[in-house]
Amino acid sequence: MSSGNIVKAGVVALLFALVFVLGAQILSLASQSSKAGKDFAEMQNKLDQARADQNKFSADLEYYLNPENLKKELKGRFNYKEPGEKMLILVNKDGTSTPTSSPR
């Protein structure tokens, strides 16, 4: 075998090794890109949920800023009653009770 053929064989072997290494790197990069895309979609879903929660909390805040609504919620949730009001407790057929306030 002549030295020219040995050099050509060496160059071909080097090129095959280079193509193999580059192919492995490309596959690794594609895998990382796919994982990053999935992570981005997950974070986007979490952001959308957080924005929906923020909108709900803002609407609740606006509702409770009205004193009449706040009073209504206090009466309904915590059995609060104003002086002169009587409280009625209604019992459902399933055994749960619902407190309600009524004016005298």
Image (spheres, rainbow, N blue to C red):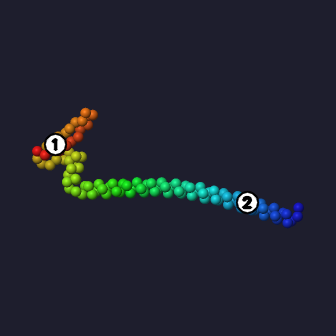
Q: Position of residue 74 (x, y in %)?
A: 22, 49
Residue located 25% across and 33% down the image: 93
Side (left or right) of 40 relative to 49:
right
User: Which numbered tag is attached to residue 20?
Assistant: none
Q: Which residue is mark 2?
A: 17
Q: Where on the picture, by quarter, is residue 88?
A: top left
Element on which disc 2 rests: helix
Residue located 64% across and 59% down the image: 26
Element on which disc 1 rests: strand
Mark 1, other Cα within 10 Å: few <14 / some 14–19 / many ≥20 = some
Side (left or right) of 66 relative to 4:
left
Q: Position of residue 86 (x, y in %)?
A: 13, 43
Q: Which residue is mark 1?
A: 87
Marks 1 and 2, Cα distance to the nearest angstrom? 86 Å
Side (left or right) of 73 relative to 82:
right
Side (left or right) of 75 relative to 16:
left
Residue located 20% across and 52% down the image: 71
Q: Position of residue 43 (x, y in %)?
A: 46, 56
Indicate the quadrant containing the N terminus: top left, top right, bottom left or bottom right: bottom right
Picture layout, residue 100 above or below residue 67: above
State if disc 2 and disc 1 touch (CB < 8 Å): no
Mark 2, other Cα within 10 Å: few <14 / some 14–19 / many ≥20 = few
Q: Position of residue 103 (x, y in %)?
A: 13, 46
Query: Mark 2 or mark 1, which is nearer the start of the sequence?
Result: 2
Tag 2: residue type? Ala
In-front residue for pair 39/55: 55
